[in-house]
Image (tube, grey):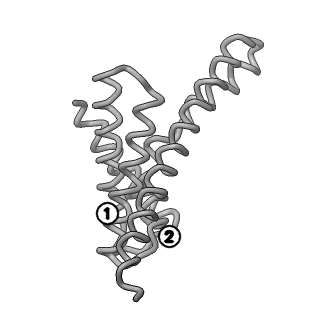
Amino acid sequence: MDYISIGLAFLSSYFYGVIANVPKRALLSSGFTGAISWATYLFVVQSIDNVFLANIVAAFLIGVVGLVFAKRKKVPSLMIYVGALIPLVPGGMAFETVTSFTKGNINAGVAGVFNTLVIAIGLVCGFSIASLGLNLRKKEIFKGHRK
């Protein structure tokens, strides 16, 4: 495991939360969630070498762990998600894609667009699965208490 990159994931999540005006009581939780998701991403990529699945698993973990931290800190879950998602966003890849197009390297640009979309779709799928699962669980839990 690359401990330096996990530490940098924590710092990027934490300080992006500072920039995005996340409440102080949620900053550490956002940083830890970002570091945990990045470590999971690295583990899945090294284990099965599938970036799409790694992003799904990491985004799912952000959804679940972020909700737990949000309930514990009494903040909206979005406050945790905002910073925690930053290490997974393919910003550098998108920049390289645009650079490839401006240099006239169309093949590399198209490949970059495809790779960026695969990562973005993986993140959306992971968040969706987590949200759907947690919402179904809430309905199941509260179903018995509404009598």
Q: Is residue 8 left or right of residue 83?
A: left
Label 1 or label 2, whichever lies nearer to me, is: 1
Q: Which residue is mark 1?
A: 29
Q: Secondary structure at mark 2?
A: loop
- Position of the C terminus, as image quadrant, is bottom left
Residue in the picture at 50% in, 70% down: 21
Where residue 55 sits in the image (x, y, percent)?
44, 37
Q: Secondary structure at mark 1?
A: helix
Q: Residues within 10 Å of mark 2 (few under 14, many from 20)?
A: few
What's the mark number on residue 21? 2
Mark with earlier residue (1, 2)? 2
Residue 1 sits in quarter: top left
Q: CA distance from mark 1 to mark 2?
A: 14 Å
Q: Nearer the viewer, residue 83 or 8?
A: 83
Q: Residues within 10 Å of mark 1 (few under 14, many from 20)?
A: many
Q: Nearer the viewer, residue 93 or 116?
A: 116
Q: Amino acid at mark 2?
A: Asn
Residue 93 sits in quarter: top right
Residue in the picture at 39% in, 78% down: 142
Residue 27 sits in quarter: bottom left
Q: Is residue 104 left or right of residue 90?
A: right
